[in-house]
Amino acid sequence: MSKAKLDTVFQTVEEAGEKAFVPYIMAGDGGLENLNGRIRFLAESGATAIELGIPFSDPVADGPTIQAAGIRALEAGTTVQAVLDEVAKEKDNRSVPLVIMTYLNPIFAYGVEAFASACETAGISGLILPDLPLEEEGLVVKSLKKHDIALIRLVALTSTPERIRALAERSEGFLYAVTVAGTTGERASFVDQIGTHLQALKAISKAPVLAGFGVSTPEHVKELSQYCDGVVVGSRIVDALYRGDKQQVADLIASRKY
């Protein structure tokens, strides 16, 4: 797949009058041999795309739930190469785009060009790097463009108007609107002006705007989707899969339609 696949699935969702739902899972948590099965389950449950975490020992953007999943994955021996090899097995049978979320260190250790090439081989459509500043994107942009992989930018609530506009103008795949001032993890509520913030992003973004960080209930999905193109849900999905509660995951994904 390629970043064009991301564009296609988001366009299909919009034309159907629906909202996008992107679940996050940690590769290797629960066993790497179960990864493709989880991807199939999420696709069959209605996921628009899937954000696939590659574990790292210092995950600065992740809250306790995803940190714990990353530790479990690392302790099980999960590596960048192993994850890419595993998802490559189902490349030709997979209809849902995969987006990798990881950090710069593992990519530098692997080699930026080699990593982008391996992602293309594995059918990866996009990449999220929460510790990559806008000013340093030149470190990876050339290789990602060469291999047709979208660099998905994150916009913080604390970003200046000028920075928000710069990120929105460069957006590919989707613009990831961080809805809390902090790390990932479940939250009871969001800031009062979150709707206005998301609508403002939609007005200037070249790509669909998805809200993420802290989205953990069907009510959150419905609330935030009023103002943007969909949501990303991580910690609640990771926790439910860890507990073996697939029904909760399916119900969360289904909530985007109501």
Image: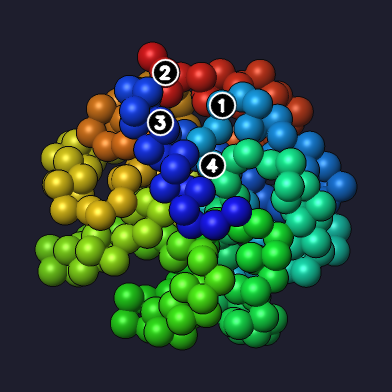
Q: Of callouts 3 and 2, which one flags the residue occurring earlier in the amino acid sequence?
A: 3
The residue wearing badge 4 is 49
Q: Name the front one of labels 3 and 2.
A: 3
The answer to which image quadrant residue 212 occupies is top left
Q: CA distance from mark 3 to mark 1?
A: 11 Å
Q: Is residue 1 visible?
A: yes
Label of residue 97 in the image:
none
Looking at the picture, does residue 110 appear above or below residue 63? below
Task: Name the spot of residue 143 as percent of width and height, x first.
Answer: 52, 79
Q: Is residue 240 visible?
A: no
The answer to which image quadrant residue 78 occupies is bottom right
At x 60%, y 40%, the residue is: 96
* Mark 2 in CB contact with mark 4 (< 8 angstroms): no
Q: Of callouts 2 and 4, which one flags the residue occurring earlier in the amino acid sequence?
A: 4
The residue wearing badge 1 is 46
Secondary structure, mark 3, is: helix
Q: Of callouts 3 and 1, which one flags the residue occurring earlier in the amino acid sequence?
A: 3
Secondary structure, mark 4, is: loop
Which quadrant, please, contains the C terminus?
top left
The residue wearing badge 2 is 257
At x 63%, y 45%, the residue is: 25
* Mark 1 in CB contact with mark 4 (< 8 angstroms): no
The residue wearing badge 3 is 13
